[in-house]
Amino acid sequence: MSSTERKHFSTCTLCEAMCGIEVTTVDRQIISIVGDKQNPFSEGHVCPKAMALKDLYDDPERLKQPMEKSATGWQTISWDEAFDKVANQLYAIQQQYGKDAVGMYLGNPNAHNMGSILFGPYFYRALKSHNRYSATSVDQLPHHIVSRQLFGHQSQIPIPDIDHTDYFVIIGGNPLASNGSIMTVPHIKRRLKAIQGRGGKVVVIDPKKSETADISSEHHFIKPGSDALLMLAMLNTLFKKGWQKPGVLLQHAPDLLAVESYVKAYPGARVAPLIGMTEQQIEGLVEGFCAAPSAVCYGRMGASVQAFGTLTQYLIMLFNMLTGNLDKPGGMMFTQPAADLLPHSGRGSIAQYHSRVRKLPAFAGEYPVSALAEEITTPGEGQIKAMVIGAGNPILTTPNGQQLDEAFASLEFVVAVDFYITETTRHANIILPPVTALERDHYDVIFHNFAVRNSTKYSPAIFEPEDHSLTDWQIYLSLAERLDRLNGSETKHYADLWAKQPKGVVDDLLKNSRYQYKEQGLSLQLLLEHPHGIDLGALRPDLPAAIYHVNKNIDLAFSYFMADLPRLEQHFFCGISTEQNTLLLIGRRHLKTNNSWLHNSPRMVKGTNNGLSRCTAQINPVDAEQHGIQHGQMMVVTSRVGQVTLPAEITDKIMAGVISIPHGWGHNKAGSKWSVAEQHAGVSVNDLTDEMVLDELSGNAVLNGVPVTIAEV
C-alpha cells in the first residue's frame, strides 16, 4: 500500500501567539511545518519554534509509556499498573499524614493544553490538598490580582489593541522574543512597524535594549525594580499638567480622580535619580502619550517579577484609565472570545488561606511557589511528603532552585506527568508521559481570551493516538476516578466525562457563544468545516458587560493596592541602597528557548551568540572594565543563595549596573535523560534568585533586581 502525503491545518502551541500551521505528513511522519497562509488570525506567520513541534514528536528520548524507577534504573510499566500505583501511594500518604501532605506543581504548558485546562481540575479536586503551586507566581500573578480586584475576574485582563493604537509604551516586555505574552499577537514585528508606518510611536522602557527596543521609536533604560516609581511619577505629571481625561470611564469608576492624592508625593524630580531617567524624559513620555489620538501602556514580565510588580501593574492600569484609554479602540481592550470559559471558572479568591511556614497568602487556590521548598523540608502537620508535577520543571524555573532540588530528593513519593526525564522529573518514582501537542485535539481555551483580534479555531489531532498513548486529560481523569473511589467519593459522573471529552465542553461553549457566522451559530462541527479558523472581527468596547462585579463598577481597591506605598517609600527613600560593586540581575528570553523542552531540539539550540552560547551573562562595558572582565571570559556570579559560573558577554545593550542571564538553562543535574540539552547545559539563573524576597502584595517571586556580585574566574 503506497503512502499518501496529507496536509493538516493546526495551531502552534509553543507560545501564546496561536499561529496557524500547515503540517505535511506521510503515514506517521511529519515532513514539514510551515505557516498557514489561510489562517485569518496569523496570516501565514510562524516563528522558528514551530518546527520544534516536529522535534518533540520525533525525539528518541521522549517517553511514550509509563516509567517506574527501580533499583536497577527506569522500567516500563503498563498504564493500569501505573495509575493504580500512583493513586494507591498518594492515598496512603494522605491517610498517614493528612490531605495537605501531597503537593502539586503545574507548569506553563498546561495553559496551552485544552485537556489539562478543562479536565485537570477533576484531579486537583480529588487530591483535596491546599498545597497547590504553579508557574503563575513566577510570572503573571500581578496581572490576575489586578484584574480580580478591578474587574471581578482573575482572567479578565485587558490587552493592547495594537492594530489601532498610535502610541504604544512597552514596560519590561520583549514581544519580539515572546511573541506577545498576555497579548496573543502573531506577526508582532509587522504590527509594531505598522504603528510607526501610520505616524505613531513605539516606546520601550527596559534595563536591556532588547530586540523590540531595537526597532522601537524610542528606548529608555530603567533601573531594575523601579517601574512602580516611574508609574507614580507619570501619574503625578498627568495631574500636575492637567492632562487627565478619563471621559466616560468615570461612569464605571466614579472615584478614579482620587488617584491624585496618592501620587502627589512622587514628582518626576524626586523619582528620576532613582530610576535612571530624567525628569524631562518622564514628562516627555506622558506628553507624547496624552497627545496621541489613541495610546496604550503595557507592562509585562519584567514589570511583574519584581518587588513592586503588583503595584506596578495596577498603576499601569490606572494610567490607561486616567488617559481615557481603557475600553477604547487603540487602548487597553477586552477580548470577546467565542468559547468563553470565564463565566464558568473561578474568579480568583485572595488570601482565603495561607501557607503553613511563612503564612503567605493563596491566590485562586495556589500558594506562591517560593514557599514550596520550605513546605517540603519543615517538619510538622501539613508537611509535604509527596509531589505531583504536571508539565513543569520548577528546579530550573523557580527561586533558589538548588534548595528545591535538595527538597525534592527528600520526598517519599513523586509522580510526574511529562514526556522527558528532566532536572525535576528525575526525582519521580513514576512518570506518566502524555502525547505531544500534534497528537491531541486543540482549542486555545485560554489564549483566545487575550488575542488582539477576535477569532476561533479548532485543531483536530494530526495523528490518531498509538495503542499505548494517552493524552493529559485521560491521565488526569484516570487518576481522579481512582482517588475518588479510594476516598469513597461519588464516581458516577466520570462515565459522562469520558463520553463528553474536552471537545464536548468546547462545543457547549461555542454553542452558547455571543457570535454567529453567516447567520449560523458556532459549534465544533462548524469549526471542523473551517479548518483554517474563522475571523470574528476587531476588538470592540465592552463596558460595563466586561465587569464581573455585581454592581458593574470597576473597583479601584485603593485600600488594597495603595497600602503598598509605605513599603515602597521605605524601600526607595529611607537609606536602602545597593552595595558598591553590586549589580542587579535580570532575566531574558530568546525566541527559540521559551521552555526547557525545546533545549533538547538540536535546531533550537544550535548557533552562536556573538561567538558564545546563548547562556551568557550580559554586562555593560563600564562594569566589565571595572571588574576586569573580558568578552567571553568565564566569570563567577554570586547572590545570597548561590553561585554560577558562565561566560561574559559584553554589550552596551545592557544598562550599566545591570547583569542579564537567561532563564531555563542549567541542564547539568545527574540523572536527567536528555542528551542534547545536556550538551548545551548552561547554568540556571534560579540558582541565584532568592526565595525569601517576594512582592509582598501578591507573593509573586522577585526574579528581576536581584543583587549579585561578579568576579573573574
Image: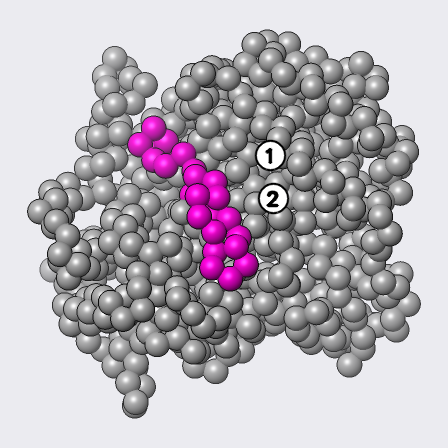
The C terminus sits in image quarter: bottom right
Residue 26, visible in the rendered structure: no
**Direction from residue 99 to residue 357 in the image, left or right:** right
| SS assignment at label 1 | helix
Residue found 70% across the figure and 69% down from its top: 640
| SS assignment at label 2 | loop
Residue under pointer 2: 697
Q: Is residue 261 above or below residue 664?
A: above
**Residue 158 screen position, x and y as percent:** 52, 28
Q: Residue furthest bottom?
A: 72
The N terminus sits in image quarter: bottom left
Residue toward you, 635 or 555: 555
Residue toward you, 47 or 62: 62
Q: Which residues are magenta?
A: 340-364
Residue found 35% across the figure and 65% down from its top: 101
| Mark 2 and mark 1: Cα distance apart in space | 8 Å
Is 347 covered by the magenta stretch?
yes
Q: Is residue 155 above or below residue 495?
A: above
Label placed on residue 560: 1
Residue found 70% across the figure and 23% down from its top: 259
Residue found 23% across the figure and 24% down from its top: 511
Colouring scheme, one of rainbow, by chain, secondary structure, one colour: one colour
Is 470 covered by the magenta stretch?
no
| Mark 2 nearby-residue class (10 Å; few <14, some 14–19, many ≥20) | some
Q: Please name the amino acid that badge 2 sits on.
A: Leu
**Which quarter of the picture shows residue 282?**
top right
**Which quarter of the picture shows residue 234?**
top right
Residue 139, visible in the rendered structure: yes
**Residue 402 screen position, x and y as percent:** 56, 73
Cβ atoms under marks 2 and 1 closer than 8 Å: yes
**Residue 578 screen position, x and y as percent:** 83, 58
Label placed on residue 254: none
